[in-house]
Image (cartoon, rainbow, N blue to C red):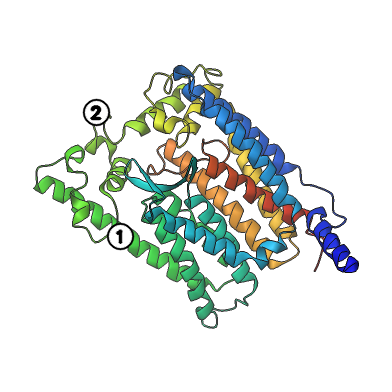
Amino acid sequence: MKIEKNRLLYKFKLLFSGHSLREWDLISPIAIVILLIFGVCAIYSSQSYRGGVQWKAQIGWAILGAVLYVGAARIDYGIFLRYAHWFYFISVALLLCLWSPLGMRHFGALRWVKVGKLVIQPSEPAKLGFLVMMAAMMARSEITNLTNSIGKILKFLLVFCVPMLLVFLQPDLGSALTFPPMLFAMLYVANLSQKFFIYAISCALILLSIVVFDIFSYRLFLDRHGLDIANGTGLYEKHSILPLKDYQRNRIISFVAPGVVDPGGIGVSWNLRQSLIAVGTGGAFGKGFNNGTQAKLGYLPKSVASNDFVFSVLAEERGFAGSAVALLAYLVLIFNGLRIAALSRDRFGTYLAVGISVLFLTHVCINVGMTLGLMPITGIPLPFLSYGGSFLLICCFLQGMIQSIYRFHMSYE
């Protein structure tokens, strides 16, 4: 009995000690700390005019996130391979809870689960569950050419479609768009035949054509009934085959032709125009900490200034120089993740690190592109900068997993 107890204690120590590997990669933590400081300052500035306290909550979430980061980093990432299916099923169950009495609707979207005072956004754990499950399945599968791997690819697509569809139906188009890049990046690293990617791109172009036709039909519908975007929102979606909401169509139209649908800039393109003003007036070195005006004066709405458009607040106060430092920190974080993926001791670690890095890259590209008018506006936050507990905690945990891959990259089972 004593010998068995000692064995369990030894295994526990191995699990959290990283064997003899005590070296930590310091590149990613430094980049994360820089981004967190920028984020707290931008959140404070976006709310200082009305005495907001979200910046205090963000510090609390950051401290808890640091605990999660260290915890994930000290655990041998191999345990995630063993229990990958549990991560996936729990994340899907959380998504399904949205359509239960626990689901909480806000601004017409069903994106939060409330248990007592605890509010969770299930789309964030869903990304974690999908990443772990997909990396585990691919690590256990031999992927060769498209013909011999078709059965495995269909399984991958099933695991991919379930969480993505549930996220899309909330509706949360921004978060749903983060799933395909993760899948294709991992499949690309697995050296899947190029035919698959040719077929996938062809299907994507066909889907894009259908969406364009749907948007065109939406405009014809409004013109036919003598309606504009402000008065016609919510009418066309009842007749359309595509599961898009009219406000999502409005965002796409305002991105393509803002001067046509909203010439005065006071409708669907308001947030984008105020964001561009904030970025443009920041100049080379910005207006200084807490000296930005777009969020303070309410031009950049308080509902988006601290989360989806936090980069606009940062650019106005820190200017081009500060924005460049933040983007450089993201670049370092992402490329360091890819470097660690190459160091991984096994395929699971490689797929996991690549998927996490591509997820962060997708968030940065969509969010920053959105604030600069380079992409349609979607509700997708910026890692470590945007306000939000669930998102920040998941980001810290994901980066902790990459740290674990680095710490254990020399050990073999």
* Helix, strand or loop at mark 1: helix
Instruction: Tell me the quarter of the image containing the N terminus.
Output: bottom right
Give the x, y percent position of residue 306: 47, 31
Query: Which mark is first along the chain, 1 or 2?
Result: 1
Helix, strand or loop at mark 2: loop
At 69% from the left edge and 42% from the top edge, which residue is drawn?
67
Residue for badge 2: 264
Decide if residue 188 is on the left or right side of residue 75: left
85 lies left or right of 121? right
User: Disc 1 marks which residue?
Assistant: 209
Q: Position of residue 88 (x, y in %)?
A: 55, 63
Tell me which corner region of the image, top left, top right, bottom left or bottom right, holds residue 100: bottom left
For badge 1, the amino acid type reads Ser
Vertical side of 306 occupied by 19: above or below: below
Q: Quadrant of residue 57?
A: top right
Q: Is residue 61 above or below residue 336?
A: above
Going by the numbered disc 2, the residue's amino acid type is: Gly
| Quarter of the figure with the C terminus | bottom right
Front-most of 403 and 170?
170
| Residue 324 visible in the shown view | no
* Residue 175 picture location, percent across and down: 45, 50
What is the distance, in whole Å, between disc 2 and disc 1 at their CAs?
Answer: 29 Å
**What residue is at 64 percent from the left and 49 percent from the top?**
397
